[in-house]
Image: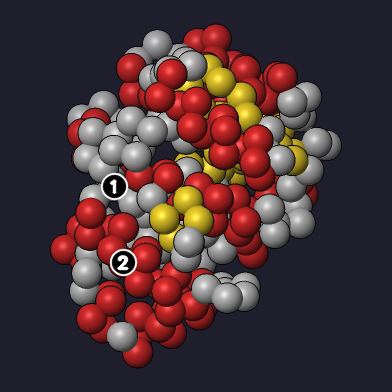
Amino acid sequence: MRVVAVIQARIASTRLPGKVLKPLAGEPLLARMLERVQVATELDDVVVATTTNPEDDAIRTLCAELDVPCFRGHPTDLLDRHYRAGVEHKADAVVKIPSDCPLIDPAIIDRVIAEFRSSDADFVSNLHPQSYPDGNDVEAMPMAILETAWREAKRDYEREHTTPFVWDQPERFRIANVAWDRDLSLTHRFTIDYAEDYELLAAVYDALYGGPFALDDILQLLDARPDIFRINAHLAGINWYRHHAGELRTIGRSA
């Protein structure tokens, strides 16, 4: 089985424009994230999926400098972009990882994919329900399931967020979750949507970068430096689900 990670990335952002190119330890955020994703041993390839918008030429240029494949597709239909990237790169399965997760732990990626490889599930993630700190998002599915969603999903949020068509139908698809031994999903925020998120990420990289560092290293830093932890603590638990709580049937029990 050829498992390909597709990392969605674009310059435009309503809350924090250009966030994927903001510097972390002297390099663009996306470059630092790719460093971490490429450490994962369960992946066969990593592809950045950006848009056809001219402003995203900068992402294509960065990928060329890093020797990372770059697919360009629909600006807002992420389901279409993921599916076509998977087809172009001959994936048997696609792993969806958003580009706003520069602290993602490669061991978590490997754990989710190992579960996916060994199971007969149609969809495996660590998000339903969440337990890891926000910013360690990993979702894996066979191309056949991704294609089903691509063909049948109609709602805007199903197209924009790629996978709800699958995980919000547990009666139709076999859904599996990789849970952690604790739940920090509503207290620790390692993603980037706001200026405070970037401030925390930059502080963590300034403190830890210089060699590999894992989730435990980050948590130990935040325990020792509560001033860093507090930077974006007021944003913990904010995610896109809240805008569709009346439409997502499983959100109350699975996200």
In the picture provided, is 135 more to the left or to the right than 109?
left
Point out which mark residue 200 bears: 2
The total of numbered circles placed on residues is 2
Q: Residue at x 28, y 47 (%)?
A: 193
Instruction: Judge whether 160 appears above or below 153 on screen.
Output: below
Query: Which badge, 1 or 2, is on the more N-terminal residue?
Result: 1
In the picture provided, is 155 more to the left or to the right than 165?
left
Residue 191, position in %: x, y?
37, 54
Name the element at disc 1: loop
What residue is disc 1 on?
A: 193
Name the element at disc 2: helix
Q: Residue at x 43, y 18 (%)?
A: 53
In the picture provided, is 186 more to the left or to the right than 120?
left
| Residue extending farthest left | 234
Look at label 2 and name its amino acid: Leu
Instruction: Judge whether 215 appears above or below 99 on screen.
Output: below
